[in-house]
Every structure is written in structure tokens, then in C-alpha cells.
Image (cartoon, rainbow, N blue to C red):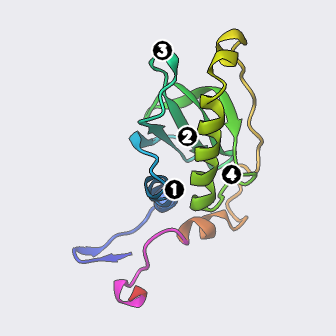
Amino acid sequence: MVTPKGTWVVEWRELHVGYIHDVYIALVRREIRPSAHWITEFLPRSATIVLAEPYLPGGMEYALAWDEECGWRFGVFVQGDARCPTLLKWQTCMCGDVLPDPGEVADTVRFLAERSHGRRRLRRRTRQAWSMPPLYRSYRDVDDGFDERLRGHLPPDDPESSM
């Protein structure tokens, strides 16, 4: 990728940064405010976006977690950071693809947050649920076209070509 400061080589481990950025922007455009986000330092490539609101009773926060094998999950944030995998409780797997359209992700988050917010009492009475997300691919599948899909979310190599 060419920048005003020279050429920036996007490493394989960083190809998902453009996609995560696109999802972040889609959330903001739908008035969903993230409070924190990070890209993890391990494989499979993954990222987390913690939402500023709505909060659940007891100060619990919603979060989105993405990885290149399972796609997006939405749930109550338990723990995680750039060096620790994100753990969500009451998680819901979203959008049926490992790389859904960013607008679809944001619309689904809005729907799930509104639905979950209306069922607060039910959640307090039920036991903690841990569901296993689907496995759409393996990070070891290097020739399946996934990296090309990720590259589609990066800025163009020649900034002049996008004008």
C-alpha cells in the first residue's frame, strides 16, 4: 500500500485490520458507540469491539468478538485483551459467514442488543450459557480465497485510483 510517507507492506497477520475498521465505522454510523477495541496478537487472527452502551444490570458490557475461523460473536464481555482471547457469556454467533458485510454486522448488533436488553430478567434467572461457535474455515487454509476477501477491505495501493 502506498502512503504519503512511502510504501507500507501489509503483512499476512494484519490483513484483517481493514475489515475490522469497516465494521467499526458501520457501528458508529448506526449510532452504536464502541468503548474499546483491539486486535489480538495470536492466531487465528482476531479482534474485539467492546460497546459503550447499552449496559446490562450490574455494569456488564456487550462486546463483539471476531476471528478468521468462526466469524462474529455477540455477547456479554467477560475478559480479553490483545494478549488474551476474548471470552463472552450468553454469546450469539452472527451473520452465518466468517466475513459478512460490515453493515450487516452493525444491523445485527443493533437487533441483538435491543432484543437482549428487553430480556434482562430472564437472563438473571438462567444459568450461564456457553455455546460453541461454528467453524467456517481454519486459519491454516491459506489458499481458500479468504485473504483476497480481506484485501478488499484495505485502502487501494494507489490513493489516486480511488478518486
Q: Where does label 4 land, which residue?
A: 140
Mark 4 to mark 2: distance in Å?
Answer: 23 Å
Say which residue appears at 48% left-offset and 14% top-offset: 58
Would residue 3 appear left or right of 46 to someone viewing this image? left
Q: Where does label 3 land, which residue?
A: 58
Percent position of residue 119, x then y? 66, 25
The first of marks 4 and 2 along the sequence is 2
Mark 1 packing: few (<14 Cα in 10 Å), some, or many (20+)?
some
The first of marks 2 and 3 along the sequence is 3
Camera-side residue of 148 and 21: 21
Would residue 161 appear left or right of 73 to someone viewing this image? left
Judge whether residue 142 is colored magenta.
no
Name the amino acid type tagged 2.
Leu
Mark 4 to mark 1: distance in Å?
Answer: 24 Å
Q: Where does label 1 land, which residue?
A: 23
Camera-side residue of 70 and 145: 70
Instruction: Determine contact: label 1, label 2, CB under 8 Å.
Output: yes
